[in-house]
Amino acid sequence: MRKSKNFLCIRKIWGKFIPECFEIFFKSIMVLNIVLFFILIPLQLSFDVDFIGNDFKTPVAISLFFFLIEILWNVCKIASRPNSKQNIDCTNQLVKDLLSLLYITLIFFEVQPNFLLNISSLFYIFRYQNFTTSIKIIEGHLCLNHLHSIIFSFGILISKVLLCSHGYACMWHYIGFINCSNDNTWLGNAQILSEDWNVRYIESLYFISATINKIGVTEILPANRREKSFLMFVFYSSGGLLLYVLVNVLALMQNFIETKKEENQMKMKFDDFFKKKKFDYQLKIH
């Protein structure tokens, strides 16, 4: 009896108080949190810089707290719909959420070995679904007009491209860094192996950005078969990325044009209606 009352209380809180007051604010924080770790985790793995370790214990603890709040949020959603068919999807998402936090949790508690850490970092990709879902919820709550909605969608599209470029750049650096004792790498040929991580990151991102946009760069060249193989992968996969961007941009433009046509047609219908009824011009304006 007490358990059913607790679930009833959860349903009341979830169904009334939380969505109305905190959902858009909380989802905005979670989007920033997810993007932050999509940036930091590749940097930590590739450049061997401690972004999530001892020097950043407090920020990581705060981020973990928000991630756990989101997991609790999803548990409340399951509890608020005990007979819903969506519970299976929510349960699957709950498992993915827990797996996605594995790397951050292991780093926070300084778990070894490094091989286990590197494998666990791959699970963070599950957070991408949370990112897209949160963006849709935020857009729905903002009640944007059609033009602002297109601008918002275009901004999200650009952010996805930038995150992909960031991931490519970190992988490109890692491939040149794993054989740093051998000068026959792009880092050695560019003579930046002893530079700070931020210098190496900028050079790596510059080269990857040029490769993605199909611009030839002669300052940095692959120096071995491993680097050449990776560049072939980047070249062909970035073609798919550019096609994805082009298709989405064309879809946004088509959607905007069709909406403008519908607005003009509605305006013409109203004008014809007012002309037939011979309403006063001032009434038409109001």
Image (cartoon, rainbow, N blue to C red):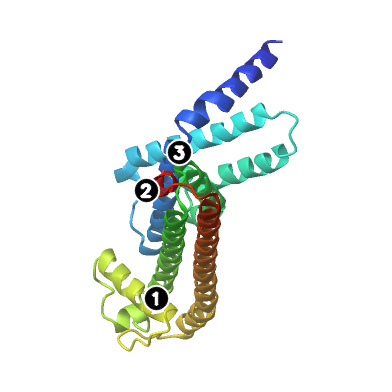
**Could you give the CA–CA distance between mark 3 and mark 2, rounded to whole angstroms?**
27 Å
Image height of 148 relative to 231, above or below: above
Asked which secondary structure carries label 1, the reply is helix
Asked whether the residues under the numbered discs 2 and 1 touch, taking CB atoms below 8 Å apart as contact, a structural biologist would say: no
- The numbered mark, 3 or 1, whose residue comes first in the sequence reads 3
Left or right side of 179 for 133: right
Residue 38 image offset from top left, x and y in percent? 44, 55
From this viewpoint, which residue is outermost toward the front? 278
At horizontal 67% and vertical 39% (from top left) the residue drawn is 91
**Could you give the CA–CA distance between mark 3 and mark 1, rounded to whole angstroms?**
35 Å
Question: Marks 3 and 1: which is nearer the front?
Answer: 3
Residue under label 1: 208
* Dot 2 crowding, Cα within 10 Å, few <14, some 14–19, many 20+: many
Asked whether the residues under the numbered discs 3 and 1 touch, taking CB atoms below 8 Å apart as contact, a structural biologist would say: no
Number of labelled discs? Answer: 3
Residue 220 image offset from top left, x and y in percent? 33, 84
Residue under label 2: 52
Image height of 242 relative to 73, above or below: below
Residue under label 3: 24
Residue 200 image offset from top left, x and y in percent? 29, 70
Q: Looking at the image, which is closer to me, 96 or 162?
A: 162
Q: Looking at the image, which is closer to me, 9 or 143?
A: 143
Asked which secondary structure carries label 2, the reply is loop
